[in-house]
């Protein structure tokens, strides 16, 4: 589908526009450098500007790449889809627009000395069908441990004990599960082992002395 450029009709007699819908990699060898008319020296005062819009929605296309084929001139559209290329000489230019999700489109523009043009450049969106993406949430480390704990609990063995500290997420998860779960972290485990003398042994014994007041009361 040919590209369409719109502008003030008063300038139509001075500018030739040919919309070419080019596939990626096609037409890249076409000569596009500006050509001086009649051998007269170029005056680099001409300019090409405009807005790139979606052909269907008429919304501006942001971040589209605008090239003048055969030159090193390249720019990008701004937040409202506009761009400007200044300091151009008289001659014929091929303007190419590339944007993600749109077909590559080109226009042939002929400028006279000092001419400044401003157009609306329409690009056609490409209908691309993507494969569906399925996102699966993976259980956290604590949730996996809790699942293992539930399996052991239903089998009638084991309690949930860890030597580290429980995170806020772990405590919140336990509060939401229907089963009654008691969390024993490293500090609580150490206290219970010492209190009930389980899994520990005496290494040193200390005797603390106090004054026997009864002894002094019985002394004559």
Image (cartoon, helix red, strand yellow):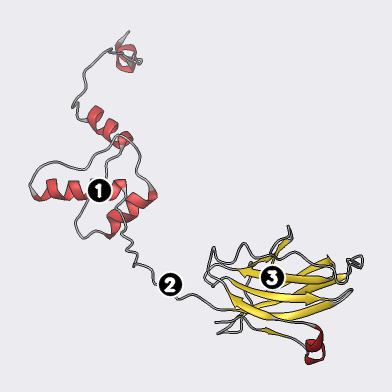
Q: How many residues crowd mark 2 within 10 Å: few (<14), some (14–19), many (20+)?
A: few
In which quadrant is the C terminus drawn? top left
- Left or right of 187: which side holds 89? right
Along the polypeptide, which appears first: circle 3 or circle 2?
3
Residue 22, quarter of picture? bottom right
- Circle 2 sits on which residue? 128
- Circle 3 sits on which residue? 95
Compare residues 1 and 169 and report the one nearer the observer.
Answer: 1
Q: CA distance from mark 1 to mark 2?
A: 39 Å
- Left or right of 53: which side holds 143? left
Which residue is rendered at x = 74% and y = 60% of the image? 73
In the image, residue 28 lies at what x, y percent?
61, 63
In the image, residue 190 lies at what x, y percent?
28, 30
Q: CA distance from mark 3 to mark 2?
A: 25 Å
Name of the residue lying farthest toward the left: 155
Secondary-structure class at tag 1: helix
In which quadrant is the N terminus drawn? bottom right
């Amino acid at each position: 589908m040919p590209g369409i450029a719109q502008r003030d009709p008063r300038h139509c007699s001075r500018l030739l526009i040919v919309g070419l819908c080019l596939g990626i990699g096609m037409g890249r060898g076409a000569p596009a450098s500006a050509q001086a008319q009649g051998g007269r020296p170029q005056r680099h005062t001409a300019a090409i500007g405009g807005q790139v819009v979606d052909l269907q929605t008429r919304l501006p296309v942001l971040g589209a790449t605008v090239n003048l084929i055969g030159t090193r001139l390249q720019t990008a559209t701004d937040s409202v889809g506009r761009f400007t290329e200044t300091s151009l000489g008289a001659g014929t230019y091929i303007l190419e627009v590339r944007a993600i999700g749109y077909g590559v489109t080109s226009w042939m523009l002929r400028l006279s000395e000092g001419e400044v043009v401003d157009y609306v450049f329409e690009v056609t969106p490409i209908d691309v069908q993507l494969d569906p993406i399925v996102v699966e949430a993976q259980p956290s480390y604590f949730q996996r441990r809790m699942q293992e704990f539930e399996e052991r609990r239903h089998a009638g063995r084991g309690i949930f004990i860890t030597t580290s500290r429980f995170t806020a997420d772990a405590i919140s998860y336990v509060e939401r599960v229907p089963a009654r779960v008691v969390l024993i972290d490293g500090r609580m485990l150490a206290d219970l082992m010492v209190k009930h003398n389980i899994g520990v042994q005496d290494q040193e014994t200390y005797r603390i002395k106090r004054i026997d007041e009864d002894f002094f009361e019985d002394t004559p």
